[in-house]
Amino acid sequence: MKRWLLLPINFIKMALIKCKECAKDVSSEADRCPHCGITISTAIRCKNCNSANTERISNASKVGSALMWGVFAAGKMTKTYKCLDCKVSW
Ligand SMILES: [Zn+2]
Ligand SMILES: [Zn+2]
């Protein structure tokens, strides 16, 4: 019974994604599909062009642009990822 109570908490913590190979639900924390065994790319996809060629904008670079551009960088401060293909950040 104790286990039963713990289950829903784990489900909330783990986001589920669909395996692109077997289309079964896989935890987004997993780097491998437990059903078919393929490696799951955890790369963040670009919201604009769907490219996986993205990078996380570090807090250090956010602070750097704030110092350089002042208020003009304020909008940039809320963006977390940048696409290296189409240069869109979000
Ligand atoms: Zn799979
Ligand atoms: Zn893009």
Image (cartoon, helix red, strand yellow):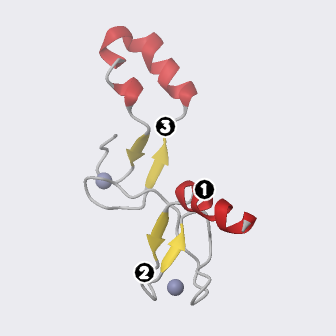
Give the label, 3 or 1, closer to the camera: 1
Instruction: State yes or no: Cβ of the residue under disc 1 lies below 8 Å from any atom of ligand 1.
Output: no
Residue at position x 37%, y 13% in the image: 69
Q: Quadrant of residue 68?
A: top left
Q: What crowding class fits label 2: few (fewer than 14 Cα within 10 Å), some (14-19), or many (20 or more)?
A: few
Residue at position x 53%, y 74% in the image: 26
Whether residue 32 sits left or right of residue 85 in the image: it is right
Q: CA distance from mark 3 to mark 1?
A: 30 Å
| Residue at the front extreme, as displayed | 1
Give the label, 2 or 1, closer to the camera: 1
Label 3 sits on a secondary structure element that is loop
Lower sequence index among marks 3 and 1: 1
Instruction: State yes or no: Cβ of the residue under disc 2 lies below 8 Å from any atom of ligand 1.
Output: yes
Q: Which residue is under mark 1? A: 9
| Residue at the right extreme, as displayed | 2
Mark 2 and mark 1 in contact? Answer it, CB < 8 Å.
Answer: no
Percent across and percent down for residue 8 are 57, 61
Q: Amino acid at mark 2?
A: Lys
Q: Which residue is under mark 3? A: 57
Residue at position x 45%, y 86% in the image: 21
Percent across and percent down for residue 81 are 42, 43
Lower sequence index among marks 2 and 3: 2
Give whichever of 63, 33 is nearer the camera: 33
Label 2 sits on a secondary structure element that is loop
Q: Amino acid at mark 3?
A: Ile
Q: What crowding class fits label 3: few (fewer than 14 Cα within 10 Å), some (14-19), or many (20 or more)?
A: some
